[in-house]
Amino acid sequence: MADDDGIYDEIAEREKHPERRYTRAELRALRTALRRIYQYGNEREFMSFLRGIGLKDESPQFVELVALFRSLQRGRKP
């Protein structure tokens, strides 16, 4: 996921300036990365992505998103 490093860097930069909004291109890149992780990735890649965008493991949002990812993955597989 070499191109994801650029996404992570951009998100880290955005965290320094929270009042700034994401551009359409940035949102498109995030959606693409998430779609790829959902289709071909696993839970570890998803957790790594969440850490890359600044969510901590202790965060309630982190736990909620991982639980959602697990339920989606379970529902998708026979």
Image: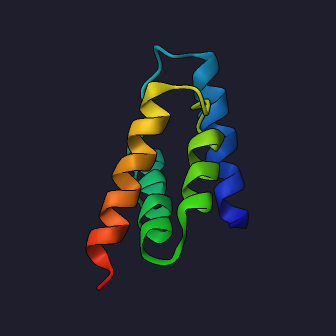
Q: In this view, does 6 lie to the left or right of 43?
A: right
Q: Position of residue 62 (x, y in %)?
A: 49, 36
Q: Position of residue 21 (x, y in %)?
A: 42, 26
Residue located 46% across and 37% down the image: 63
Asked if 77 appears above or below 48 in the picture, the reply is: below
Q: Where is residue 69 in the image (x, y as percent from the top left)?
A: 39, 56
Where's the C terminus, which quadrant?
Answer: bottom left
Asked if 5 appears above or below 32 in the picture, the reply is: above
**Which quadrant of the figure has residue 70?**
bottom left
Q: In this view, does 67 lie to the left or right of 54?
A: left
Q: Can residue 22 be seen? A: no
- Return the residue found at the far bottom: 78
Where's the N terminus, which quadrant?
Answer: bottom right
Residue located 61% across and 61% down the image: 45
Q: In this view, does 58 lie to the left or right of 60?
A: right
**Which quadrant of the figure has residue 53?**
top right
Observer-nearest residue: 68 or 27?
68
Tally the numbered discs. 0
Residue located 64% across and 57% down the image: 4
Residue located 46% across and 13% down the image: 19
Asked if 45 appears above or below 6 in the picture, the reply is: below
Observer-nearest residue: 53 or 19?
53
Q: In this view, does 18 lie to the left or right of 16?
A: left
Q: Can residue 56 be seen? A: yes
Observer-nearest residue: 57 or 50?
57
Observer-nearest residue: 7 or 42?
42
Image colouring: rainbow
